[in-house]
Image (cartoon, rainbow, N blue to C red):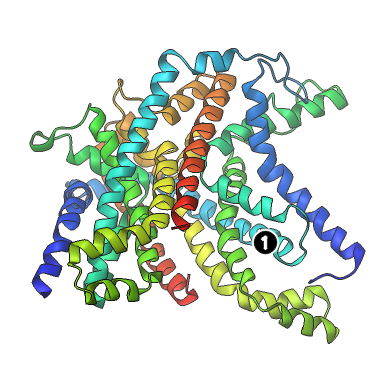
């Protein structure tokens, strides 16, 4: 539409390909290729193998994967509960109260994750709440980090929600709890599942705060990928990275299926 | 009625206060240890990290804006088969952690990576010329790669709402594509560019994974300094001071971003 001449169009497409493929497609392909090889000394990797994957699904690696999955699911569920509750409560408040509450819950996005990790470490290494050295400190930090995103997407969905539905239900005599459970939450379900997917993906890939907090017996997958590449095992690291990406994608896919089924209702 | 509304808001706020606001307050308190600020501000490593963080973030943001604008322009206005798939790919790209990009760059431009491998194969030299990965330029490349999609998404949303008739009219009146981009598309895209750009700026200031995976001793940013002070040196007072500076920088910018994006209607 913008460019009408044939050469102009092709110039734009060639420019796009030249920029897009090496910058965005190549990195993911390279990781995939490296995860199946043992050497990379020329233009292309060599020594095809699946040994890295065999190692990635047992022992330490399998434990890291389950650690990541448990952490991400727990953090997402808690974050979704707290974030949705806060978004619903904020919507019921006046304009000023809503702004304060939204600002409070958005703050963790702006604060660097490393600082969130440091703050949690400082606060929960002391006697009243001694969590340092347990898995709970990692799960807690992930929850703090993803709650902001859950809150943000649910409150955006609430803004778009037509108030007619709840007003109609209420005018027909439905109690507030009934309106919430049978009208509002079902209408919000598509955005809730989308928010759950976002929280899960973020938590699966979280490295910054985790590096500050993880105890030896609760090492999530990103940390394991870092320790592998740090000692020079780049190929093992990329197999683990592919496992991480696949797990994230599968979860997102599952969540988007729930969403499409919910939107037919 | 109003009091019950406030009561309902209490539990989530109490949870947030316990797990986030109270810990943050402790960091502030810890940073106020006598002499901590003076000591950190006087150290060369802190000033170096501050300068590196800011210039890397600004340069990465400019790079993302230029690259994101060009790519989004082609997707939106010079449509090609597979454009939808590219948009999907960008969404998926956003859900991956940032350190994967650095890992990939190690295979692409590392000492034994693809680029150097091609060079040695072609020229017969024992080593290739690409060794910028452990310098700030490697971090810059990784940050531009990872954060450009964050600019493209709001831009594509803005472009999809644009009246294409405007472009047709400008074009039928004889305006060349570059002029249409400058005078019709760019003004419409400014709010989305501002929103995407300030978000990327904040995320670059806070980025840790990319720098950590680079493994370069020469590249220290503020988040990296917080990590090394706290975990490697167990110097919590200094770590908290650096953390406060980092928070002040990024929260200040984030407030700006919220203002800009609210005006942009994003």
Q: Is residue A218 left or right of residue A25?
A: left
Q: The N terminus of chain A lies in which quarter of the figure?
A: bottom right
Res. B97 visible in picture: no
> Residue at the location (81% across, 56% down)?
A13
User: Relative to residue A16, is residue B218 depicted above or below?
Assistant: above
Mark 1 secondary-structure assignment:
helix
Q: How many marks?
A: 1
Where residue A51 appears, as percent x and y from the top left, is 59, 12
User: Relative to residue B71, is residue A23 depicted above or below?
Assistant: above
Dot 1 falls on which chain?
B
Where residue A160 appears, as percent x and y from the top left, is 41, 70
Q: Is residue B76 left or right of residue A90?
A: right
> Residue at the location (68% across, 41% down)?
A25
Between residue B1 and residue A117, name the one nearer to us: B1
Q: Residue furthest front?
A: A172
> Residue at the location (69% across, 38% down)?
A26
Res. B164 visible in picture: yes
User: Relative to residue B76, is residue B170 depicted above or below?
Assistant: below
Between residue B41 and residue B246, name the one nearer to us: B246
Where residue A252 appears, as percent x and y from the top left, is 49, 42
Q: The C terminus of chain A lies in which quarter of the figure?
A: bottom left
> Residue at the location (68% across, 50% down)?
B85
Q: Is residue A211 left or right of residue A256?
A: left
Between residue B72 and residue B103, name the one nearer to us: B72
Instruction: Find disc 1 in the rendering and name its residue.
Output: B72
User: Relative to residue A96, is residue A29 depicted above or below?
Assistant: above
Q: Is residue A208 left or right of residue A54?
A: left
Circle 1 crowding by C-alpha within 10 Å: few under 14, some 14–19, many from 20: many
Where residue A12 appears, as percent x and y from the top left, is 81, 60
């Amino acid at each position: 539409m913008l460019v009408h001449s044939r050469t102009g169009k092709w110039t734009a497409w060639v420019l796009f390909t030249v920029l897009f493929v090496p910058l965005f497609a190549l990195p993911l392909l390279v990781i995939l290729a490296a995860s199946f090889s043992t050497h990379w000394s020329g233009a292309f990797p060599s020594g095809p193998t699946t040994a890295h994957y065999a190692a990635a699904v047992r022992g330490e690696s399998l434990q890291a994967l389950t650690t990541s999955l448990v952490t991400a699911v727990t953090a997402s569920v808690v974050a979704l509960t707290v974030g949705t509750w806060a978004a619903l409560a904020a919507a019921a408040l006046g304009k000023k109260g809503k702004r304060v509450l939204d600002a409070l819950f958005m703050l963790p996005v702006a604060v660097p994750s490393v600082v969130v990790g440091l703050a949690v470490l400082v606060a929960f290494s002391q006697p009243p709440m001694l969590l340092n050295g347990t898995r709970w400190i990692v799960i807690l930090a992930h929850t703090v980090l993803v709650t902001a995103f859950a809150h943000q997407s649910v409150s955006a969905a609430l803004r778009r929600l037509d108030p007619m539905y709840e007003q109609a239900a209420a005018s027909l005599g439905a109690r507030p709890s009934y309106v919430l459970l049978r009208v509002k939450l079902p209408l919000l379900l598509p955005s809730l599942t989308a928010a759950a997917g976002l929280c899960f993906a973020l938590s699966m890939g979280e490295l910054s705060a985790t590096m500050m907090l993880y105890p030896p017996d609760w090492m999530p997958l990103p940390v394991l990928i870092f320790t592998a590449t740090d000692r020079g095992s780049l190929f093992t690291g990329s197999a683990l990275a592919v496992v991480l990406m696949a797990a994230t994608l599968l979860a997102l896919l599952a969540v988007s299926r729930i969403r499409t089924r919910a939107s037919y209702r | 009625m109003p009091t019950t509304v406030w009561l309902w808001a209490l539990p989530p706020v109490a949870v947030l206060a316990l797990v986030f606001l109270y810990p943050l307050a402790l960091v502030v308190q810890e940073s106020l240890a006598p002499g901590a600020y003076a000591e950190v501000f006087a150290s060369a490593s802190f000033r170096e990290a501050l300068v590196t963080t800011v210039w890397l973030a600004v340069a990465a943001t400019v790079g993302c804006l230029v690259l994101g604008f060009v790519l989004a322009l082609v997707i939106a206005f010079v449509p090609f088969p597979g454009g939808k798939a590219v948009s999907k790919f960008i969404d998926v790209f956003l859900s991956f952690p940032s350190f994967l990009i650095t890992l990939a760059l190690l295979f692409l431009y590392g000492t034994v990576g693809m680029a150097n491998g091609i060079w040695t194969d072609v020229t017969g030299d024992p080593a290739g010329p690409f060794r910028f990965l452990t310098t700030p330029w490697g971090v810059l490349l990784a940050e531009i790669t990872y954060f450009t999609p964050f600019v493209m998404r709001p831009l594509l949303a803005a472009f999809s709402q644009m009246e294409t008739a405007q472009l047709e009219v400008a074009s039928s009146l004889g305006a060349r594509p570059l002029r249409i981009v400058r005078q019709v598309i760019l003004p419409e895209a400014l709010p989305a560019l501002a929103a995407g750009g300030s978000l990327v700026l904040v995320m670059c200031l806070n980025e840790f994974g990319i720098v950590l995976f680079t493994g370069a001793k020469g590249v220290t940013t503020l988040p990296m300094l917080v990590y090394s002070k706290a975990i490697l040196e167990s110097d919590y007072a200094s770590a908290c001071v650096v953390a406060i500076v980092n928070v002040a920088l990024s929260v200040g910018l984030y407030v700006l971003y919220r203002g800009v994006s609210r005006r942009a209607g994003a």
